[in-house]
Structures are given as structure tokens and as C-alpha cells.
């Protein structure tokens, strides 16, 4: 009888040990899967942020090329001069004095320049949409499990409105990339960390 009781006790103890080990392994596996899911989501979110920043840069570069380059300014000046000459000629033909003709020409040139300026400002407003997409892409990154990613995202958002300051934006992009890379690189296993000869 004592043998039977001892056997039952050892079976209960082994069952309890097995149950604790199974629970620990299940929890560890679930934690690892959750971590992998977080890392996968972070990679997707970081890619969306990078694409949004590049889109802002592209829109600003296109806007600068189309509306602020020397060729565009020269074209605008030529159009204004031709419009002024046309307005002055019309006023002169209609019987106006030289002074009236000049003022009429300036008035026509001012109309053309104001329309051009309005169109240029509307094109600058196009940057608002990519900036909104960048802010939307940054939103989940601001809740990241890694504080370095949160800080790097904040710095990148702060640098984005000053897209003309390319050095600051590039530095913020590099910092963001390093933070995401560090957060998504898997940690070495405990065996790899304990392996002799491993450089630290």
C-alpha cells in the first residue's frame, strides 16, 4: 500500500511538473509569436512612413521645378512684359495718353502675375496631402513598443515641414531607419549569448 501511495505521489508530482513546463512553454511560444507580430507590424508601419516622407520630398521637388526654377521665373517675367506691352498698346490705340498707356500695361501685367501667383500657391497646397499621409503613417509608430522608434518618429515629423532643410531631414531619416532596424532585429538566443568566444 505504501508503494502504491508513493507511486501515486510521484505520478502527481511528475504530472504537476509537466503541467507547469507545458504552461511555461505555451506562454513563451505565445510571447514569441506576439513579438514577431509586433515586429512585422512595425516593419510595415516604418515602410509606410518612409514612402510618405519620400512622397513629400517628391512633391516639393516637383513644385520647386515647376514654379520656382529660373526657367519658370524667366517665363513668368516674359509673359508679364508681353502682357504689359499688349495692354499699353491697346490703351494707346483707344486714344489714351502715354502715361495712361503705361498704367494700363502695368495693370494687365499685375493681373497676369496675380493669377500666376494664385496658381503657384494652389500647387504649394498640394504638399498638404502628402504631409497628412505622413502624419497618418506616424500615428501607429508613436505607440511603438520601442521608445527609440517613438523618439525618432517625433524627430522625423518635426523635420518634415522644413523639407527644404535637406540635411536635417536626411539626419532624421537615418536616425529613424537605425531605430527601426534595431527594434526589428531579433535578439540572439540565450545560448548564442552564452556561447564562448562570442564578441560582445
Image (spheres, rainbow, N blue to C red):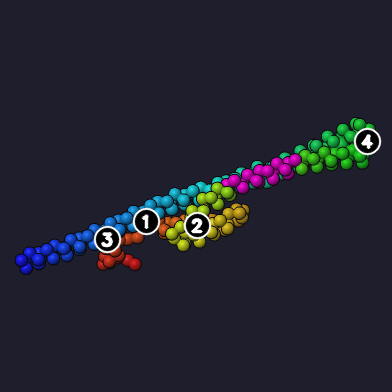
Residue 88 position in % (x across, y down)? 87, 36
Task: Give the Cα separation between the discs numbered 1 and 4.
Answer: 81 Å
Residue 120: say if magenta.
yes
Which tag, 4 or 3, sits closer to the chain's start?
3
- Does dot 4 land on a helix, a strand or a loop? loop
Residue shown at 58%/57% (left/top)?
A: 159
Q: Is residue 188 left or right of residue 166?
A: left
The residue carrying mark 1 is: 35
Residue 163 position in % (x across, y down)? 60, 53
User: Quarter of the image holding residue 122?
Assistant: top right
Which tag, 2 or 4, sits closer to the chain's start?
4
Numbered disc in front, either 2 or 3: 3
Q: Is residue 101 left or right of residue 167?
A: right
The residue carrying mark 2 is: 142
**Residue 102 vertical placement versus 47 (above, below):** above
Residue shown at 83%/34% (left/top)?
A: 86
Disc 2 crowd, CA 10 A, few/some/many (<14, 14-19, 20+): some
Amino acid at each position: 500500500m505504501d508503494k502504491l501511495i508513493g507511486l501515486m505521489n510521484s505520478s502527481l508530482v511528475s504530472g504537476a511538473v509537466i503541467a507547469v513546463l507545458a504552461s511555461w512553454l505555451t506562454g513563451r511560444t505565445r510571447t514569441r509569436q506576439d513579438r514577431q507580430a509586433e515586429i512585422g507590424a512595425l516593419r510595415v508601419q516604418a515602410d509606410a512612413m518612409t514612402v510618405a516622407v519620400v512622397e513629400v520630398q517628391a512633391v516639393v521637388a516637383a513644385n520647386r521645378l515647376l514654379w520656382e526654377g529660373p526657367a519658370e521665373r524667366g517665363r513668368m517675367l516674359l509673359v508679364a512684359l508681353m502682357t504689359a506691352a499688349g495692354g499699353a498698346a491697346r490703351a494707346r490705340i483707344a486714344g489714351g495718353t502715354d502715361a495712361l498707356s503705361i498704367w494700363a500695361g502695368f495693370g494687365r501685367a499685375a493681373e497676369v502675375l496675380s493669377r500666376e501667383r494664385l496658381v503657384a500657391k494652389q500647387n504649394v497646397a498640394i504638399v498638404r496631402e502628402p504631409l497628412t499621409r505622413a502624419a497618418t503613417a506616424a500615428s501607429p509608430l508613436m505607440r511603438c513598443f520601442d521608445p527609440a522608434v517613438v523618439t525618432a518618429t517625433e524627430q522625423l515629423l518635426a523635420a518634415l515641414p522644413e523639407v527644404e532643410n535637406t540635411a536635417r531631414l536626411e539626419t532624421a531619416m537615418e536616425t529613424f531607419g537605425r531605430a527601426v532596424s534595431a527594434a526589428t532585429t531579433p535578439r540572439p538566443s540565450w545560448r548564442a549569448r552564452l556561447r564562448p568566444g562570442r564578441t560582445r
